[in-house]
Amino acid sequence: MKSGFSPKHKASLAAAACNRHGNNGGQEPDPLSEEACRDSYVPQGMLVSFFLCLSALLLALGFAFNTPQEIGQGLVKILTSPANLITDYFQLANVGATLVSAGFMLLFSLGVIRVSGANITGAVIAGLFTVTGFSFFGKNILNTLPIMLGVYAYAKALRLPFSTVVVQSLFATSLGPLVSEICFNVGPPPLPAVGLGIASGVLVGFMITPLAAHCIKFHQGYSLYNIGFTAGLIGMVFMAVLRGFGVTIETVSILSQGNNMPFGMILYGLFALMLLVSLRLNRWRFKGLAYLFSLSGALSTDFTALAGFGATGINMALLGMMGTSYALAVGGEINGPVIGGIFTLVGFGAYGKHVRNVTPVLLGVFLVNLVNIHDVQATFAVLAALFGTTLAPIAGRYGAFAGVIAGALHMSLVTNIGFLHAGMNLYNNGFSGGFIAALLSPLWEAVGRMRFATSTKEKTNNKAS
């Protein structure tokens, strides 16, 4: 792992980072944001230490909930069971085993980053939180490792440094259930089935990076879960082939209940600590936060480079509290999948999501659930709200009303699109979000052009009169 920049280069490189805008609608740099970047500079070693502490916390909590024997039995069940949507590892195994698995997955992913030589950027932070979150419902070391190896093989085949595709290797694990299903649920004898499942994972990993580069053009970066959209297409094709051989895989709903009190306290405590640390990094100020909120968030917008780690950390902590509060306020359950949704929301708080562009999407999902047939407190509806924030850049670019519409349409589509991949793609909301973004972004662009044309005509008429 690179240790960060030398002290004498901190200020100059932080200022240069602040000027890398990504897709932010062509906004001009804010000098205050540049100062915030310099003030809240964080060495790579400190970032590694944060994730190590988070991993240690998850591991320790696991042993606080269950005995070592129960955890061991639960881990075996997690590793050897199909993992398609929605399989809550709290219910499938036990809480302790799930926490230990999630802590180990974070530690493993951090090791992959170190081996690759990549720095921890906003995209990497999003990837680490996403892998950890989905380790509560669908990901484990057995079904993710083959996919990561496939991404590594792709980099080697093209003679690319692994660091250039390591983020893709983290997100590509969304197709982990495909590996688990083929290994343990499709039907061949155990040994050939495991070999076939691993081979399928390697193939998926090899394919996903080049496909993702083309898929982003479809939605123009207005859905943050681009790998989720790509994985949905791959999962759809794999399922079509499997169904052609008579294989039937149905989506499931294995969910736990009764964990709101302990995990509400744990999550609020974690995010409160993150908030305090981030405020300390930001010298107990909110400098850079207003600038961060002004960005659209469309891919690729690295908040750590644009607004600094202090403001970014504050945003992440606020999003974590917002996600937890939403789930509890609507009467939902804080189970494994919902924790995964909250962690993903927090992670993308470094890479595209902020309080301002997330709120309209959450509101859109909530409002449509008040009038449709779905129960607003059902886990799948809570997940649609949390993960539906993949469309936050729509609100960031086109305004709050556009965000509400995006959230409402996403809720309608995401409940119907899972059949295509039969739950093989854990990022089902990313699959749905890609279509919604591709539908809405050109329409809002057309509305903007019509408004501009009308305004120009009015100004011309006024001058003529």
Image (cartoon, rainbow, N blue to C red):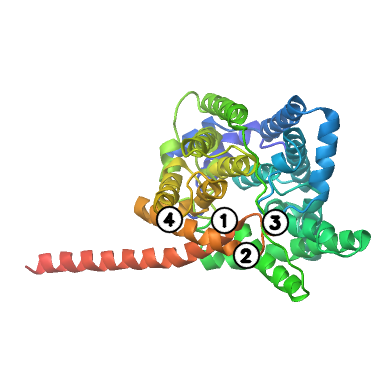
- Is residue 266 visible in the rendered image? The answer is yes
Q: Could you tell me if the residues under marks 2 and 3 are in contact, i.e. CB atoms within 8 Å?
A: no
Q: Earlier in the sequence, mark 3 or mark 1?
A: 3
Q: Give the amino acid at mark 4.
A: Asn
Residue located beneath label 3 in the image: 172
- Residue 431 in picture, x, y percent from top left: 58, 61
Q: For residue 372, which numbered disc appears in the image?
A: 4
Q: Earlier in the sequence, mark 4 or mark 3?
A: 3
SS at badge 1: helix
**Relative horizontal placement of residue 124, taking residue 405 as reference (left or right):** right
Q: Give the amino acid at mark 3.
A: Ala
Q: Give the amino acid at mark 1.
A: Asn
Q: Quadrant of the N terminus?
A: top right
Q: Is residue 86 above or below residue 262?
A: below
Q: Quadrant of residue 240?
A: bottom right
SS at badge 2: helix
